[in-house]
Image (spheres, rainbow, N blue to C red):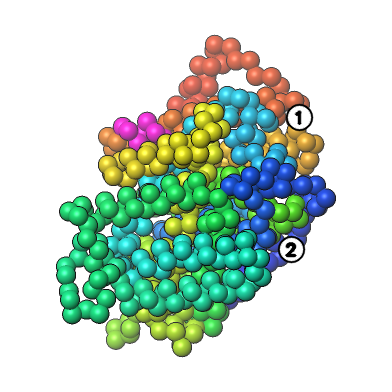
Amino acid sequence: MTSTILIAIGLVALFLGYKFYGGLLERKIAQPDDSRPTPAHEKFDGVDYVPANKWVLLGHHFASIAGAGPIIGPVLAASLYGWLPAFLWIIFGGIFMGAVHDYLTLVASVREKGASIVKIAEKSISPLAKNMFSIFLFVALSLVVGVFAVVTAKTFIKQPELVLPSFGLILVAMFVGFLIYRVGLNIWLAALLGFLSLLALIWLGYQIPITLGGSYNPSHPYWFVLNIPSFGIDPFILWTLILLAYAFIASVTPVWVLLQPRDFLATFQLIFGLVLGVFGALLAGAAVKAPAVASLHLGDMPIWPFMFIIIACGAISGFHSLVASGTTSKQLDKESDAKLVGYGGMLLESLLALVALLSVTAGLYWLSKPEGVEGFVFQDLLKQSPILAFGYGYGELVSQGLPFITFAMASFFGMMMLNAFVMTTLDSASRINRLIFSDLTGIKNKYVASLAGILIGALFALTNAWTIIWPVFGSANQLIAALTLIVLTTYLIGIRKPTKYTAVGAVFMTLTTVSILIYQTVAFLAKGKTLLAAVAFVLLLLALLILKESYKVFRNYYNLPEIKLSQPTKVLLGLFFLMLVVFIVFLQKVSL
C-alpha cells in the first residue's frame, strides 16, 4: 500500500461524506432559512456577537478545533495498532459522528440564540444536568488553557525561530481586521496582504530566533532582540506567564479585532501546510512501512475502547461542541453557512489526521531502516516526542513528493503549523471558558469571568498539577462528545426532528467512554494513583447522572418503561456492576 492510494481514498471519502451525508443532515434536520436572523445579527454587541464572512468563520472554527489532537492522536494510534484501524476510524468516525456532532451543535446553538451546549442541556434535559455539565467543562477548559500554555512555552524554548512569527501574526491579524471591518477593504485582498506578511514573519523567524535570558552576543547582527532579559525568572515560567496573559487579553478583546482575523490568517498557514502534506502524500508514492494491523490487544490497552479515545479530534472531539456553541454560533452570518463551517470544518480536521497518519507510517521507517539508506525510524523519534515524529515524517513525505521543498523547510513548516493550532486553541478555550463561567455563576463582568479560568489554568501549569490529571483528559474530552450527542438527541426530540443521526453516535461514544473510565478507575487504584482514580470515578458518576436525567426524556419519546428499582434490584445491579469491573480488569490484564 502506498501513500498515494491512501490519501486518494481519504480525499474521495471525505468529499462524498460532505456532499451526501452532510447534505442529508442539512435537508432533514438543519433546514436553513437565511431570512431568519442569526444571533450574530439579532444580538450584535461588537464583542462576542459579530457576523463574519463564511470563509473567515471557517478559518476561525477550523483553527480553534484543530489543536495538537488530530496530529498526536493518529501518531500514537499508528504506533500501537497499525495504520488500518486508525485510517478507518478517522474516515468513518469523522463523517458519521464527528462532523454530525459539530454541525448539529452549531445548528442547535444558532436556533437557541447563541446558547452554549450547557444551556441547551438545561432546556432539553434539566437544570441539574446543565449545572453538572458546566462545572465539568469549566475545570476541563481551565486544564486545556494551562496545558496548552505549557506546550507552547516549551516549544518556544526548543525552537526560538517560532516566536517571531507566532506573536507577529497577532499584530498582523489586528491590522487585517482593521482593514476589513473599518476601512472596508476587500476580504481577499486583505487576506493576501496578511498571508504575505505571515511568510515574511516566518522568514524573519529563521533569521531572528528569539530567546529569553540568553547570553549577550554583540557579534550577532540581531543581538538586541535575540536575547530578551528574563529578569532572573526561569524562561519556561516567564513564557508561560506571557502566554496566559495573552490568553486573558484575547478572551476579552472583541472578536473582530483579533479572533476572527487571527484565525482566518492562521488558517492560510494551516491550509497551506495541509495542502503540502496532501500533495506530498499523493506525489511521493511512498510505501507504507508500518503494518496494517500491529496489534488488537496490547496488554492493558485493547483497541476498543483505547484507540477511539487516543485518536480523539481526528474523528470526534467534545471540545468541538464548545467551540461550535461558544464562539462560532455567535459569528454565523447566515444559517446556510453552517454546513460549510460545522460539517466541513470537522472533515478538514479528519484530513489533517490522515496527513499525520501517513507522515509517520509512510514517511518514516518501522522499527529499523535498511542499512545504508537515509531516513528516520518511527519508534526512535516517538521515544523523544510524538510531535517530533510527526515533524520529521511530514518533512520526509513532503520533500519526497515535492523535491523543490527541502526536508528542513518542510519539517519546520510542519512544526509551525502545529504551533499555530495550539495558539489558536489557547485563545478560543479562554474565551469559551469565560462564557461558561458567566452562565454558571451569573457574573457578567468579562474581566472577572475570564480571570477565573486563567488563574486556575495558571495553577495547573505552574504547579505541574496538569501532569497528574492529564492522563484522564482524553477520556474527559470524549465524554464531552458522548454527553453532547445525548443532549443533541434530547434536543431533536423536543423539536420533533429525526434522532437516529445522533442517537447511534451517542450510544457508541457513551459505551466507549464509560468502559474506559471503569478501566481507568480500577487500573489507577491498582497502581496506587488514587487521585487519578478519583477523577476517573467522578467523571463516570457524571456520565451516569446525566444519563439518568436524559432517560426521562427518552422514556416519553420512545415509550420506555419508568424505572423504579426495588432494594433487591439495586443489589443485583450493584453485583452486575462489580462483575463488569472484574471482567474489565481481567480483559485489561491488570494485576491487583
Determine the secondary structure under disc 1: helix
Q: Which image quarter: residue 350?
A: bottom right
Residue placed at 67% from the left, 24% from the top? 552
Q: Is residue 575 above or below residue 160?
A: above
Residue at (65% x, 19% y) in the render = 563
Q: Nearer the viewer, residue 409 or 335?
A: 335
Comparing 481 with 144, the one in front is: 144
Say which mark, if any, is on residue 19.
Answer: 2
Look at label 2 and name its amino acid: Lys
> Can see residue 425?
yes
> Which residue in the structure is indicated by mark 1?
557
What residue span does the magenta drawing correspond to?
530-536
Return the residue nearer the eye: 75 or 71: 71
Magenta span includes 438: no
Q: Residue at x 44, y 77 (%)?
A: 200
Q: Position of residue 421 (x, y in %)?
A: 47, 60
Q: Is residue 41 above or below residue 448?
A: below
Mark 2 neighbour class, 10 Å CA radius: few under 14, some 14 to 19, many 20 or more: few
Q: Is residue 589 visible?
A: no
Residue 292 horizontal/vertical position (percent): 49, 66
